[in-house]
Image (cartoon, helix red, strand yellow):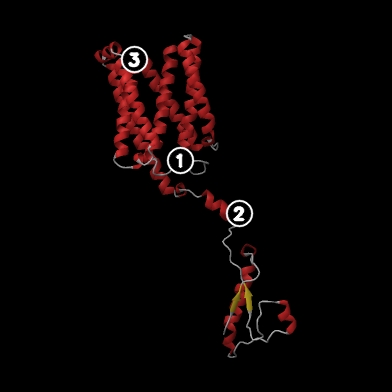
Amino acid sequence: MTMDLEVSEPIDFSSGDHQHLVRKTADVSTHPKSGQPHTTSAPGPQETRKDPYLKSPEKWNTYVVQITNDSTPEESHTNSSSSPFSDAAVRRDFIIKVFLILSVQLLITASIISTFVFWEALRSWVRANPWFTYITFPAFFVVLIVLACCGKLRRQVPANYILLVLFTVLEGLMLGAVASFYKVHEVLWATAATTLVTVALTLFALQTKWDFTMLNGMLFVLTVVLIVYGIIVIAIRAYWLHVLYAAIGTVIFSLYLVMDVQLMMGGRHRYSLDPEEYVFAALNIYLDIINLFLFILQLTANR
Protein backbone atom coordinates (compact mmCIF):
# COMPACT_ATOMS: atom_id res chain seq x y z
CA MET A 1 0.00 0.00 0.00
CA THR A 2 1.31 3.42 -0.90
CA MET A 3 0.00 6.76 0.37
CA ASP A 4 1.21 10.11 -0.88
CA LEU A 5 0.84 13.33 1.06
CA GLU A 6 0.86 16.66 -0.66
CA VAL A 7 0.50 20.12 0.87
CA SER A 8 -2.00 22.32 -0.90
CA GLU A 9 -4.87 23.65 1.21
CA PRO A 10 -4.79 24.40 4.94
CA ILE A 11 -6.77 22.37 7.43
CA ASP A 12 -8.03 24.06 10.58
CA PHE A 13 -7.16 21.61 13.35
CA SER A 14 -9.19 23.59 15.88
CA SER A 15 -12.39 22.95 13.88
CA GLY A 16 -12.04 19.17 13.98
CA ASP A 17 -11.13 18.68 10.28
CA HIS A 18 -8.17 16.52 11.27
CA GLN A 19 -10.53 13.95 12.77
CA HIS A 20 -11.96 13.25 9.32
CA LEU A 21 -8.42 12.87 7.99
CA VAL A 22 -7.55 10.38 10.73
CA ARG A 23 -10.66 8.32 9.98
CA LYS A 24 -9.84 8.20 6.29
CA THR A 25 -6.29 7.10 7.03
CA ALA A 26 -7.56 4.37 9.35
CA ASP A 27 -9.94 3.11 6.62
CA VAL A 28 -7.05 2.90 4.17
CA SER A 29 -4.81 1.03 6.63
CA THR A 30 -7.49 -1.54 7.55
CA HIS A 31 -8.77 -2.18 4.01
CA PRO A 32 -6.12 -4.85 3.08
CA LYS A 33 -7.47 -7.14 5.84
CA SER A 34 -10.17 -8.28 3.41
CA GLY A 35 -7.46 -10.05 1.43
CA GLN A 36 -7.65 -7.81 -1.61
CA PRO A 37 -5.03 -5.20 -2.48
CA HIS A 38 -6.20 -1.68 -2.24
CA THR A 39 -6.34 0.09 -5.55
CA THR A 40 -8.02 3.16 -6.85
CA SER A 41 -9.14 4.04 -10.29
CA ALA A 42 -7.14 6.53 -12.21
CA PRO A 43 -8.54 10.02 -12.25
CA GLY A 44 -10.29 11.18 -15.35
CA PRO A 45 -9.10 13.92 -17.60
CA GLN A 46 -11.41 16.48 -16.02
CA GLU A 47 -10.10 15.71 -12.52
CA THR A 48 -6.53 16.03 -13.77
CA ARG A 49 -7.24 19.46 -15.19
CA LYS A 50 -8.90 20.64 -11.97
CA ASP A 51 -6.19 19.44 -9.61
CA PRO A 52 -2.69 20.60 -10.70
CA TYR A 53 -1.05 18.41 -8.04
CA LEU A 54 -2.04 15.15 -9.77
CA LYS A 55 0.86 14.59 -12.14
CA SER A 56 -0.07 11.13 -13.48
CA PRO A 57 -3.16 8.93 -13.60
CA GLU A 58 -1.33 6.28 -11.60
CA LYS A 59 -1.45 8.31 -8.32
CA TRP A 60 -2.97 6.77 -5.21
CA ASN A 61 -5.21 8.56 -2.76
CA THR A 62 -4.00 12.09 -2.08
CA TYR A 63 -4.54 13.81 1.27
CA VAL A 64 -3.87 17.51 1.68
CA VAL A 65 -2.32 18.61 4.96
CA GLN A 66 -0.83 21.97 5.89
CA ILE A 67 1.07 22.37 9.14
CA THR A 68 1.98 25.88 10.25
CA ASN A 69 3.70 27.36 13.29
CA ASP A 70 0.84 29.76 13.93
CA SER A 71 -0.79 29.25 17.30
CA THR A 72 -4.32 30.01 18.31
CA PRO A 73 -5.10 33.12 20.41
CA GLU A 74 -5.75 30.92 23.44
CA GLU A 75 -2.34 29.23 23.11
CA SER A 76 -0.58 32.59 22.65
CA HIS A 77 -2.22 33.95 25.79
CA THR A 78 -1.25 30.85 27.74
CA ASN A 79 2.38 30.99 26.62
CA SER A 80 2.69 34.72 27.29
CA SER A 81 1.17 34.44 30.74
CA SER A 82 3.36 31.55 31.86
CA SER A 83 5.91 32.51 34.52
CA PRO A 84 8.25 30.76 36.94
CA PHE A 85 5.59 31.27 39.63
CA SER A 86 3.17 29.01 37.73
CA ASP A 87 4.67 26.15 39.73
CA ALA A 88 3.14 26.21 43.21
CA ALA A 89 6.22 24.59 44.79
CA VAL A 90 8.54 27.28 43.40
CA ARG A 91 6.25 30.04 44.64
CA ARG A 92 5.93 28.46 48.10
CA ASP A 93 9.71 28.03 48.52
CA PHE A 94 10.28 31.61 47.36
CA ILE A 95 7.76 33.05 49.84
CA ILE A 96 9.16 31.00 52.73
CA LYS A 97 12.71 32.12 51.93
CA VAL A 98 11.68 35.79 51.73
CA PHE A 99 9.82 35.74 55.04
CA LEU A 100 12.70 33.96 56.78
CA ILE A 101 15.19 36.57 55.56
CA LEU A 102 12.79 39.37 56.50
CA SER A 103 12.30 37.93 60.01
CA VAL A 104 16.06 37.81 60.60
CA GLN A 105 16.43 41.39 59.38
CA LEU A 106 13.70 42.68 61.66
CA LEU A 107 15.11 40.76 64.62
CA ILE A 108 18.58 42.26 64.11
CA THR A 109 17.12 45.74 63.68
CA ALA A 110 14.92 45.48 66.78
CA SER A 111 17.89 44.29 68.87
CA ILE A 112 20.06 47.23 67.81
CA ILE A 113 17.28 49.78 68.37
CA SER A 114 16.56 48.32 71.81
CA THR A 115 20.22 48.74 72.74
CA PHE A 116 20.14 52.42 71.83
CA VAL A 117 16.79 53.04 73.52
CA PHE A 118 17.33 51.25 76.85
CA TRP A 119 21.06 51.90 77.34
CA GLU A 120 21.06 55.37 78.82
CA ALA A 121 24.81 55.91 78.49
CA LEU A 122 24.66 55.10 74.76
CA ARG A 123 21.67 57.41 74.32
CA SER A 124 23.56 60.27 75.89
CA TRP A 125 26.66 59.56 73.79
CA VAL A 126 24.70 59.56 70.52
CA ARG A 127 22.98 62.83 71.43
CA ALA A 128 26.35 64.41 72.23
CA ASN A 129 27.98 63.11 69.01
CA PRO A 130 25.71 63.71 66.00
CA TRP A 131 28.54 62.80 63.61
CA PHE A 132 27.73 59.13 64.31
CA THR A 133 24.41 59.51 62.50
CA TYR A 134 26.01 61.45 59.67
CA ILE A 135 28.56 58.64 59.09
CA THR A 136 26.13 55.72 59.14
CA PHE A 137 23.78 57.29 56.60
CA PRO A 138 26.25 57.47 53.63
CA ALA A 139 27.50 53.93 54.33
CA PHE A 140 23.94 52.64 54.45
CA PHE A 141 23.10 54.44 51.21
CA VAL A 142 26.13 52.98 49.36
CA VAL A 143 25.23 49.39 50.32
CA LEU A 144 21.61 50.04 49.31
CA ILE A 145 22.69 51.23 45.84
CA VAL A 146 24.87 48.13 45.39
CA LEU A 147 22.01 45.80 46.33
CA ALA A 148 19.47 47.65 44.19
CA CYS A 149 21.59 48.12 41.05
CA CYS A 150 23.90 45.08 40.91
CA GLY A 151 21.49 42.32 39.93
CA LYS A 152 24.15 39.64 39.44
CA LEU A 153 25.79 40.39 42.77
CA ARG A 154 22.61 40.08 44.81
CA ARG A 155 21.98 36.65 43.23
CA GLN A 156 25.40 35.27 44.15
CA VAL A 157 25.74 33.31 47.38
CA PRO A 158 27.23 34.22 49.86
CA ALA A 159 27.89 37.76 48.57
CA ASN A 160 24.19 38.63 48.63
CA TYR A 161 23.79 37.48 52.26
CA ILE A 162 26.91 39.34 53.36
CA LEU A 163 25.70 42.58 51.77
CA LEU A 164 22.24 42.09 53.22
CA VAL A 165 23.58 41.58 56.75
CA LEU A 166 25.83 44.64 56.39
CA PHE A 167 22.90 46.69 55.14
CA THR A 168 20.68 45.52 58.01
CA VAL A 169 23.31 46.35 60.64
CA LEU A 170 23.88 49.83 59.18
CA GLU A 171 20.12 50.42 59.03
CA GLY A 172 19.78 49.30 62.65
CA LEU A 173 22.56 51.66 63.77
CA MET A 174 20.98 54.57 61.94
CA LEU A 175 17.52 53.82 63.36
CA GLY A 176 19.00 53.37 66.82
CA ALA A 177 20.64 56.78 66.59
CA VAL A 178 17.35 58.34 65.47
CA ALA A 179 15.38 56.57 68.21
CA SER A 180 17.78 57.96 70.82
CA PHE A 181 16.21 61.38 70.34
CA TYR A 182 12.74 60.08 71.24
CA LYS A 183 11.32 58.93 74.53
CA VAL A 184 11.14 55.24 75.33
CA HIS A 185 7.36 55.05 75.38
CA GLU A 186 7.14 56.84 72.03
CA VAL A 187 9.41 54.24 70.42
CA LEU A 188 7.45 51.40 71.97
CA TRP A 189 4.11 52.80 70.79
CA ALA A 190 5.51 53.29 67.28
CA THR A 191 6.84 49.71 67.27
CA ALA A 192 3.50 48.27 68.33
CA ALA A 193 1.57 50.36 65.79
CA THR A 194 3.98 49.39 63.00
CA THR A 195 3.60 45.70 63.86
CA LEU A 196 -0.20 45.88 63.74
CA VAL A 197 -0.23 47.84 60.47
CA THR A 198 2.29 45.49 58.85
CA VAL A 199 0.38 42.33 59.81
CA ALA A 200 -2.97 43.82 58.70
CA LEU A 201 -1.64 45.05 55.35
CA THR A 202 0.16 41.77 54.65
CA LEU A 203 -3.01 39.76 55.25
CA PHE A 204 -4.93 42.21 53.06
CA ALA A 205 -2.40 41.89 50.23
CA LEU A 206 -2.55 38.09 50.38
CA GLN A 207 -6.33 37.79 50.04
CA THR A 208 -7.51 40.85 48.09
CA LYS A 209 -8.53 40.60 44.44
CA TRP A 210 -7.21 44.08 43.68
CA ASP A 211 -3.90 44.17 41.85
CA PHE A 212 -1.66 46.80 43.46
CA THR A 213 1.38 45.89 41.32
CA MET A 214 0.15 48.29 38.64
CA LEU A 215 0.52 51.27 41.02
CA ASN A 216 4.30 51.36 40.78
CA GLY A 217 4.45 54.47 38.59
CA MET A 218 1.90 56.39 40.63
CA LEU A 219 3.65 55.56 43.91
CA PHE A 220 6.97 56.72 42.49
CA VAL A 221 5.45 60.10 41.62
CA LEU A 222 3.93 60.36 45.10
CA THR A 223 7.31 59.56 46.65
CA VAL A 224 8.96 62.37 44.69
CA VAL A 225 6.23 64.76 45.86
CA LEU A 226 6.76 63.56 49.44
CA ILE A 227 10.50 64.29 49.20
CA VAL A 228 9.85 67.82 47.94
CA TYR A 229 7.28 68.34 50.67
CA GLY A 230 9.80 67.10 53.26
CA ILE A 231 12.27 69.78 52.15
CA ILE A 232 9.55 72.40 52.63
CA VAL A 233 8.79 71.03 56.10
CA ILE A 234 12.46 71.41 57.05
CA ALA A 235 12.44 75.04 55.92
CA ILE A 236 9.04 75.91 57.43
CA ARG A 237 8.80 74.61 60.98
CA ALA A 238 5.09 74.24 61.65
CA TYR A 239 3.36 71.63 63.75
CA TRP A 240 0.52 70.86 61.31
CA LEU A 241 2.97 70.56 58.38
CA HIS A 242 4.93 67.88 60.27
CA VAL A 243 1.76 65.98 61.13
CA LEU A 244 0.54 66.12 57.52
CA TYR A 245 3.95 65.03 56.24
CA ALA A 246 4.02 62.02 58.57
CA ALA A 247 0.44 61.05 57.68
CA ILE A 248 1.06 61.22 53.93
CA GLY A 249 4.27 59.20 54.29
CA THR A 250 2.44 56.54 56.29
CA VAL A 251 -0.22 56.17 53.57
CA ILE A 252 2.32 56.01 50.73
CA PHE A 253 4.50 53.35 52.32
CA SER A 254 1.44 51.37 53.36
CA LEU A 255 0.58 51.14 49.66
CA TYR A 256 4.19 50.25 48.91
CA LEU A 257 4.00 47.41 51.43
CA VAL A 258 0.88 45.95 49.81
CA MET A 259 2.41 46.25 46.34
CA ASP A 260 5.71 44.62 47.33
CA VAL A 261 3.93 41.72 49.04
CA GLN A 262 1.91 41.10 45.87
CA LEU A 263 5.09 41.32 43.76
CA MET A 264 6.57 38.63 45.98
CA MET A 265 3.44 36.47 45.68
CA GLY A 266 3.27 36.56 41.87
CA GLY A 267 0.50 34.27 40.62
CA ARG A 268 -2.53 36.13 39.31
CA HIS A 269 -0.92 39.56 39.65
CA ARG A 270 0.25 41.36 36.54
CA TYR A 271 3.84 41.84 37.70
CA SER A 272 6.01 39.57 39.81
CA LEU A 273 9.65 39.07 40.76
CA ASP A 274 11.97 36.36 39.51
CA PRO A 275 12.33 33.42 41.95
CA GLU A 276 16.05 34.20 42.21
CA GLU A 277 15.29 37.71 43.53
CA TYR A 278 14.49 36.63 47.10
CA VAL A 279 17.05 39.07 48.54
CA PHE A 280 15.58 41.94 46.54
CA ALA A 281 12.03 41.01 47.61
CA ALA A 282 13.02 40.87 51.29
CA LEU A 283 14.85 44.19 50.94
CA ASN A 284 11.79 45.91 49.46
CA ILE A 285 9.44 44.74 52.21
CA TYR A 286 12.02 45.52 54.90
CA LEU A 287 12.41 49.11 53.69
CA ASP A 288 8.64 49.55 53.58
CA ILE A 289 8.33 48.44 57.21
CA ILE A 290 11.22 50.67 58.32
CA ASN A 291 9.75 53.73 56.60
CA LEU A 292 6.38 52.96 58.16
CA PHE A 293 8.05 52.84 61.57
CA LEU A 294 9.77 56.20 61.05
CA PHE A 295 6.60 58.00 59.94
CA ILE A 296 4.49 56.46 62.70
CA LEU A 297 7.22 57.44 65.18
CA GLN A 298 6.92 61.02 63.99
CA LEU A 299 3.15 60.91 64.47
CA THR A 300 3.60 59.50 67.98
CA ALA A 301 6.15 62.17 68.90
CA ASN A 302 3.98 64.97 67.47
CA ARG A 303 1.12 63.75 69.62
How far apart in space, not on screen, are marks 2 and 1 (Cα)?
A: 27 Å
How far apart in space, not on screen, are marks 3 and 2 (Cα)?
A: 61 Å
Amino acid type at mark 2: Pro
Q: Residue at x 28, y 17 (%)?
A: 118
Amino acid type at mark 3: Val
Residue 145 appears left or right of 240: left
Q: Is any atom of residue 107 visible in this view?
A: no
Q: The C terminus appears in which quarter of the rendering?
A: top left
Residue 16 position, x and y percent, is 63, 66
Residue situated in front as seen by the camera: 49 or 105: 49
How far apart in space, not on screen, are marks 1 and 3 (Cα)?
A: 36 Å
Residue 157 appears left or right of 83: left
Chain-order first, disc 3 or disc 2: 2
Q: Residue at x 45, y 33 (%)?
A: 202
Residue situated in front as seen by the camera: 99 or 65: 65
Amino acid type at mark 1: Met
Residue 252 position, x and y percent, is 50, 25
Among the 4 quarters of the image, the one containing residue 171: top left
Q: Are marks 2 and 1 in contact (CB under 8 Å)?
A: no
Find disc 3 in the rendering and name its residue: 184
Find disc 1 in the rendering and name its residue: 265
Q: Is any atom of residue 93 visible in this view?
A: yes
On residue 73, the disc is 2
Residue situated in front as seen by the camera: 172 or 199: 172
Q: Nearer the viewer, mark 3 or mark 2?
A: 2
Residue 267 position, x and y percent, is 49, 44
Residue 197 appears left or right of 109: right
Chain-order first, disc 1 or disc 3: 3
